Image (cartoon, rainbow, N blue to C red):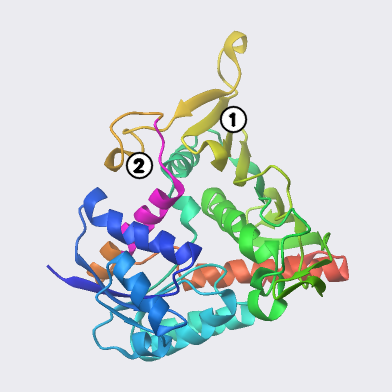
Amino acid sequence: MKKVRVGLIGTGYIGRCHAIAYAQAPTVFPLEAELQLEYLAEITPELAAQKAKEFGFNRSTGNWQDVVNDPNVDVVDICTPNFLHKEIALAAIANGKHVYSEKPLALNANDAKIMYEAAEKAGVKTLVGFNYIKNPTTQLAKEIIEKGEIGEVVHFYGTHNEDYLANPNTPLDWHCVKEKAGLGTLGDLAAHIIQMSQYLVGQDIKSVIGDMETVIKQRPNPNDLSQMCDVENEDQATAMVRFANGCMGTIETSRIACGRKMGLSYVITGTKGTISYTQERMAELKLYIHSDDPARQGFKTILTGPLHPDYKHFCVSAGHGIGFNDQKTVEIRDLINGLANPTAKLYPDFEEGFKISRILDAIALSAEEKRWIDIC
């Protein structure tokens, strides 16, 4: 059996999530290649050694360049702050490595385009961590839409709201600094629901008009809580969008939405029915079919179960649900099997990541210029 040797760069919240998924994937799914956790990089050799031991990696280093240059690494997994994605990815691509990067792909669309084109020229495979589309419930929604059960999709309403920065006393971190994060809640959260919209509608977004706002304009300096630092990007944003087929859409996002812990949600309206979903109840899909008996009309709740895509690998009973890390496990399955098969195409790839970056930049430009922006 072919081996896929992984080099992981970054072991914070999302890096740990990836590590859990690497550990789970061979148990949950029949993989088409042997998964080998080869090399791990962190900001110091000591931290790298500690995390390599925790996560089961063979080797560790305090220098990410060691990972991208190592001949025993097949795929580089980038779980760093946003500003490092481009440099690491381009170095990995230059060394013939496949690249798996967290989102947003880059600080802006120009950088994302450079990354996408470099990967295409080098002939390496790429994957971007838009993991929410891997949820079996969203896979079911996609199946319902593609079978025409709700008719032609005419409207998409999506949110990704959380409250991790709702407290104004939370110290400034890199997510609030343009040089390190780029956009704020647009890049961190809206990237997910925008990619979800294109995946479910089955069409690219072609024009946008948006607005955004920094509500909490200063936060305590993490190195001296008595001092305040400026917040350099947006806390909340909204956009109206048009898809290539004319379908309308509305996107909302906030990182200061008090009480909203995992507020990714969507309502998809078709000519024959509607789908409604929230990630806070990730094993439930609400479905309305307009042709139902008028005396029995209303949304019905479908509990995701073994008859739905990928769920059976995690649990034998409907309604028990799966978790956030399990979505990453599905993503890792797709990564390993996609790399094992020379003709397989990974999705969402850097091309999709570039498309999402263009949309994010267009929303930000629209908010600044107060007009519709076409996405060429």
Q: CA distance from mark 2 to mark 1?
A: 22 Å
Q: Is residue 278 left or right of residue 42?
A: right
Residue 138 appears in view: yes
Callout 1 amino acid: Gly
Circle 1 Cα neighbour tier, 10 Å, few/some/many (<14 / 14–19 / ≥20): many
Viewer-nearest residue: 240 or 94: 94
Task: State which quadrant residue 194 falls in.
Answer: bottom right
Q: Which residue is mark 2?
A: 309
**Contact, mark 2 vs mark 1 (Cβ under 8 Å):** no
The answer to which of 99 and 84 lies nearer the viewer is 84
Residue range (magenta) = 320-335
Question: Disc 2 or 1, which lies upstream in sequence?
Answer: 1
Say which residue label 1 marks: 273
Q: Residue at x 23, y 56 (%)?
A: 26
Residue 281 location (% of width, % of height): 53, 36
Disc number placed over residue 42 in the picture, else none: none
Q: Quadrant of the C terminus?
A: bottom right
Q: Residue at x 55, y 42 (%)?
A: 279
Left or right of 314 in this view: 217: right
Residue 374, quarter of picture: bottom right
Secondary structure beneath label 2: loop
The image position of residue 298, as x and y in percent, is 61, 19
Q: Looking at the magenta stretch, what is its main secondary structure?
A: helix
Coordinates of residue 333 in the picture (x, y in percent):
30, 58
Q: Nearer the viewer, mark 2 or mark 1?
A: 2
Residue 205, image x and y in percent? Answer: 64, 60
Residue 326 in magenta stretch: yes
Vertical order, 106 against 332 (above or below) = below
Q: Residue at x 54, y 73 (%)?
A: 105
